[in-house]
Image (cartoon, helix red, strand yellow):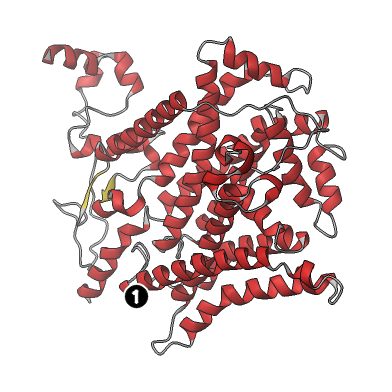
Amino acid sequence: MKKLKEFILNSRPWKSFFRHGWPDNPLDRSLIMTTNIFFHLHPVRVNKKSIKASYSMGLGIITTVMYILLSLTGIMLMFYYVPSVETAYFDIVTLQTKVPFGQLLRNMHRWGAHMMVLTAILHMARVFYTGAYKPPREFNWVIGVILLIMTFVGSFTGYLLPWDQLAFWAITVGTSVAAYEPLMGKTIQKLLLGGPEVGQAALTRFYALHIMVVPAVLFLLIALHIWRVRKDGGLAANEVKDEVEAEDGK
Amino acid sequence: MANKEQSFTKPSGKTYSLVEIVKAPTTMVDKGPDNTIFAFPIVAILELIIALGSTLFLVLFSLLKDAPLEELANPLITTDPAKAPWYFMGLQEMLEHMHPTLAGIILPVLAVGFLISIPYIDYSREGAGVWFTSKRGKRIVGWTALYTTIVMSGFVLLDNAFPPRELFRDVLPNLVTQSILPGGVMALLVILPAIVLWKSKEGSNPREIMLVLFTVLFFTAVVLTLTGFLFRGPGFELFLPWAMPGGYNPFDGL
């Protein structure tokens, strides 16, 4: 068994893939973080405080996981869905009744979307109440606020796609609020819906926003958000003890 | 080739050189920074657990409850009540109490503007990474949350029972009953706890003022969203969620 492990770890394919040894020693545990694109978002060492569940509750990670799950289930839904007022509703009915696991797929996308909105809101509250927006993290907080708004937009544009009564009237009510903006309101509403009321033009626009524009913007901003967490020194919990120590050292 | 490989010493993987001697309270020789551990594998394992756990939760929930699908969209038949998605129900609830421009545009823009400006108003680094900053901060948040829940519920109920735009329809202009009056009451309710804190004997700092204002905003949003989502039934009238007429169930519209 040990020989087999040695053989695999020393084989050319393995070495071409992993640029570090088995991570059971400090050097390789550092290298695994710096040579792996997914791990390199993390620091080599973390403060014990910042990984305590009672500090962050993992809400940011859950939100990101929801984004990934929504992307995956969303792509699968696109295989069965055509954004046309004539067929959209019946595509959903077919998906739910004829496609294997179709109902589960749609359920996961629907509930996942609600959960992402909820965890994004809770994540913002957590960041605020732990004072994690303080310098040098001010701008990452601003990115977070934009991310929250984009999450709303993503969920709201998806709401219309099933083209049932629920979707139609929720979007009618939702977009009518925009019309109350005194200067540009009517223009904004028209731009969103592509016409005076919710119809094919609105469905086409919401579809394009929902499957392409919003996910792409979210992807970029999430990348930027996480990168800045890393660059600003990890979670704010890191600093609590360090500053006390620095004062003791004087 | 084999000879060439042997002519080099085995690479150590890392080299050290003395660059400078720095006088500092921590030296990193033979020990890591205090209170830290290698991120691998513990962080990878934690993230995997969170990812698998939340995926499992979503799959189980999706097996238990189906996503709603009503009849085909029909622009001629209005649903009753017609509600926006739940996260916009706070906005829709405010539309019931004040002028649409105020409820739908001005107050949301102010709220987002406030959120974005928080770190530029409270820019001290003190207390970063500590829940509620201090014991006092925790008390401030607790009392503000209680205050907000009570006064905002009261605002909704009072305005619903005695709507000024109906009572003073012929006496006062619309601008007063729909914008100035509800807007003024809202502003007063939001600012009041901040003034109480500011004038308190112990004084206050920007962080504590932010704690008050954010808590007011957050719990106002919670109260209004819950009111709109749970307590509004047919005709957008207030009902108890378990006593909705016509078998209407707010959760069917999620």
The chain under label 1 reads: B
User: Percent from the top left, x then y, of residue B161?
Assistant: 66, 65
Relative to the observer, which residue lies in front, B41 or A94?
Answer: A94
> What amino acid is at disc 1?
Arg
Q: Is residue B90 visible?
A: yes
**Quick one: which residue is furthest to the bottom in this view?**
B201
Tell me: B231 left or right of B99.
left
- Give the quarter of the image for residue A184: bottom right
Relative to the observer, which residue lies in front, A1 or B190?
Answer: B190
- Give the quarter of the image for residue B75: top right
Q: Residue at x 42, y 26 (%)?
A: B59
Tell me: B156 left or right of B142.
right
Above or below for B234 versus A37? below
- Give the quarter of the image for residue A87: top right
Relative to the observer, which residue lies in front, A134 or B25?
Answer: A134
Relative to the observer, which residue lies in front, B113 or B38?
Answer: B113
Above or below for A150 versus B68? below
Q: Residue at x 42, y 60 (%)?
A: A132
Above or below for B54 versus B241? above
Q: Identify the element where label 1 is drawn.
A: helix
Q: Residue at x 32, y 62 (%)?
A: A239
Q: If the image is split into quadrants, where does the C terminus of chain B sit?
A: top right
User: Percent from the top left, x then y, of residue A202?
Assistant: 79, 34
Tell me: B126 left or right of A74.
left
Q: If the image is split into quadrants, where does the N terminus of chain B sit?
A: top left
Q: Residue at x 86, y 50 (%)?
A: A186
For disc 1, the marked residue is B136
Mark 1, other Cα within 10 Å: few <14 / some 14–19 / many ≥20: few
